[in-house]
Structures are given as structure tokens and as C-alpha cells.
Image (spheres, rainbow, N blue to C red):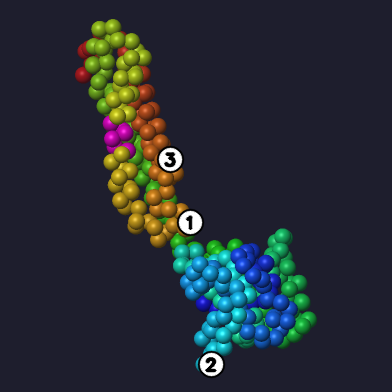
């Protein structure tokens, strides 16, 4: 891929130099046969070597002339966050003049407040030069990921509903299971078991059941994560924090679902519990 830039482009974009330098003022105004490349290109064509000082020919014309590499910069994505990094060559404007350009302005204040001032400055140089499509970098980024963000939001909604249903289901099943053991709890207490012992036993058995379910669920989720990989950026489809947090949340729900009914059952009179159906 090819980009035509001015010397201070990398500073404005926050793209860091790994080797070499940017273009000089002379190189920015005269054909000097120099280029800057990204790390992907340097790694592809000059693996294990210093790319600065090497020469490459970019076939942008019928008679490509070798140009010297004067700098290597970090990789940057231009077509989308989910796109693969491509080998990139940056040329000064005289090397490949274009009929249209993009003016990039970096500022600490609201960028849109400078739009009118920028129009005035450009038209002071050339009153016939049109300026269109003034947008902030945030707007450009938002537009490029709009479809992916919408899909991710749908997944978040569905996942949240699924998590709530799972929590409600676990609570209902565990509470019902403990409720069914009211008679057993009454017998144990009649034979001398303490309330804390009964509660600990019920919670322990309930958590073992919930733990088995969590393990099975983690295995199934791990196997299905490959279908989500295309919707993620800089987050692994097998993100450990996500799996761990959901597992802990469901375990807490199971604990509460076991603890509350078990504690309630221990407050029932043993004689009443023995006659419970």
C-alpha cells in the first residue's frame, strides 16, 4: 500500500519511528528518491536486517526507479480495525503527486471549532480550493466500526438476557432442590445436627452440582468461541477474564440459591419438617 505524506504526518498521527528519520524539507519539495516504510514491509523484505539505507522499487509507474529507505515506522491500519496490517510505503508529495489530499490537524481542543479557521487559511492560499468532508478522527473511527459495533451490541443484549435467564434458572433449580430436602433436614436436626452443619452440607452439595455445570458450560463455550473471533478487536475469543468473571457470577448465584432456602429450612420446627411433603 502507498501513502503520500508531508514530513510531520507521523507526529500528527502519533505513529512512532522505529528506525531512521522523517523526510527533510528538501525531500518534501523536490524529487529525492526516498521513502519511509512500515514495520510489516521491513520484516517481509529485510528480515533480521536494518532496512534503513536499503533501496526498493515501487511499481507505481512503468519505469520504477529504486528509492532509498530513510525510516521505518510502526504499523498502522487504514482500512479498518479488523483488517490485516499490510506492507506500507510512505512517499513525499513530489514523488507521487495527487490531485486531491487530506489535511490532518492535531489539536488539544475541540477539532470542529477550528474548521472555519482552517477554511480561511486554505482559501487565503487558493480561494478556488474547495474543502469538504470535515470530520474528527473519532467520527471516522466510529463510521468504520459502525456495523461491527451494532453486531457486538446485539450480542451484548442477547448475552445479558442469557446470563439473567441462567441466573434465574440456577436459582430456581437450586432453591427447589433444597426445598425438596426439607424433610431430610428436619430428620437431621431431630437427630442432633446443628443448623450450621446442615446449611454447610446443603451448600456444599449444591455448589458441587453448580460447579459441574460451570465446568461443562465452560467447555462448550470454549468450543464455540471461534464463531465470535471476527467481531473482536484486540480481545482474544478465549479471554480468560471473561470466562472467569461469568463463572464467578454464576457460582455466586448458585451459592445464594442454596444458602437462602437451606437457612430457611433450618428454622422450621423439626416436627413440622418431618411431616413436610
Visible residue check, residue 157: no
The residue that mark 1 highlights is 234
The quadrant where residue 71 appears: bottom right
**Secondary structure at numbered mark 1:** loop
Of all residues, the one furthest to the bottom in this rendering is 62
The residue lying toward the viewer, choosing from 123 and 232, is 232
Asked if the residues shown at circle 3 and circle 1 are in contact, with their CB atoms under 8 angstroms apart, the answer is: no
Q: Which residue is mark 3?
A: 245
Does residue 195 appear in the picture of this structure?
yes
> Looking at the picture, how far across and down is residue 103, in whole percent?
67, 75
Label 2 belongs to which residue?
63
Which image quarter holds the C terminus? top left
Residue at (60, 65) in percent of width and height: 18
**Is the residue marked by circle 3 packed among few (<14), some (14-19), or many (20+) residues within 10 Å?**
few
- Determine crowd level at label 2: few under 14, some 14-19, many 20+ residues with C-alpha closer than 10 A: few
**Sequence-wise first label, 3 or 1:** 1
The crowd level at tag 1 (other Cα within 10 Å; few <14, some 14-19, many 20+) is few
Q: Nearer the viewer, mark 3 or mark 1?
A: 1
Q: Nearer the viewer, residue 106 or 49?
A: 49
| Tag 2 secondary structure | loop
The reply to whether the magenta stretch includes residue 1 is: no
Disc 3 to disc 2, how far (Cα)? 59 Å
Q: Toward the viewer: 254 or 90?
A: 90
Counting every numbered tag in the picture gives 3
Q: Is residue 210 magenta?
A: yes
Disc 3 secondary structure class: helix
Q: Is residue 81 left or right of residue 99?
A: left
Residue 200, percent from left and from top = 34, 19
Please report whichever mark, 1 or 2, sits nearer to the chain's N-terminal start.
2
* For marks 3 and 2 on the same chain, the one whose residue lies earlier in the sequence: 2
Q: At 43% from the left edge and 53% from the top edge, which residue is drawn?
A: 236
| Residue 170 percent location from the top left of the image | 32, 34
Amino acid at each position: 500500500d502507498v501513502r503520500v505524506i508531508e514530513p510531520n504526518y507521523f507526529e500528527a498521527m502519533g505513529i512512532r519511528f522505529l528506525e531512521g528519520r522523517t523526510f527533510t524539507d528538501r525531500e518534501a519539495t523536490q524529487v529525492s528518491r526516498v521513502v519511509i516504510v512500515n514495520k510489516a514491509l521491513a520484516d517481509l523484505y529485510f528480515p533480521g536486517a536494518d532496512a534503513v539505507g536499503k533501496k526498493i522499487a515501487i511499481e507505481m509507474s512503468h519505469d520504477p526507479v529504486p528509492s532509498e529507505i530513510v525510516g521505518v515506522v510502526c504499523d498502522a491500519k487504514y482500512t479498518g480495525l479488523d483488517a490485516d496490517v499490510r506492507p506500507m510505503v510512505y512517499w513525499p508529495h513530489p514523488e507521487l503527486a495527487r490531485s486531491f489530499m487530506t489535511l490532518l490537524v492535531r489539536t488539544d481542543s475541540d477539532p470542529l471549532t477550528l474548521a472555519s479557521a482552517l477554511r480561511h487559511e486554505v482559501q487565503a492560499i487558493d480561494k478556488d480550493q474547495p474543502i469538504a468532508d470535515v470530520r474528527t478522527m473519532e467520527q471516522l473511527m466510529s463510521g468504520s466500526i459502525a456495523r461491527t459495533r451494532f453486531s457486538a451490541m446485539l450480542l451484548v443484549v442477547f448475552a445479558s438476557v442469557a446470563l439473567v435467564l441462567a441466573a434465574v434458572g440456577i436459582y430456581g433449580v437450586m432453591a427447589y432442590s433444597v426445598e425438596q430436602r426439607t424433610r431430610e433436614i428436619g430428620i437431621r436436626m431431630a437427630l442432633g445436627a446443628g443448623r450450621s452443619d446442615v446449611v454447610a452440607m446443603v451448600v456444599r452439595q449444591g455448589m458441587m452440582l453448580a460447579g459441574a455445570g460451570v465446568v461443562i458450560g465452560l467447555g462448550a463455550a470454549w468450543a464455540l468461541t471461534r464463531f465470535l473471533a471476527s467481531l473482536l478487536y484486540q480481545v482474544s475469543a478465549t479471554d480468560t477474564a471473561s470466562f472467569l468473571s461469568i463463572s464467578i457470577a454464576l457460582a455466586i448465584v448458585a451459592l445464594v440459591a442454596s444458602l437462602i432456602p437451606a437457612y430457611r429450612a433450618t428454622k422450621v420446627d423439626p416436627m413440622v419438617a418431618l411431616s413436610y411433603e
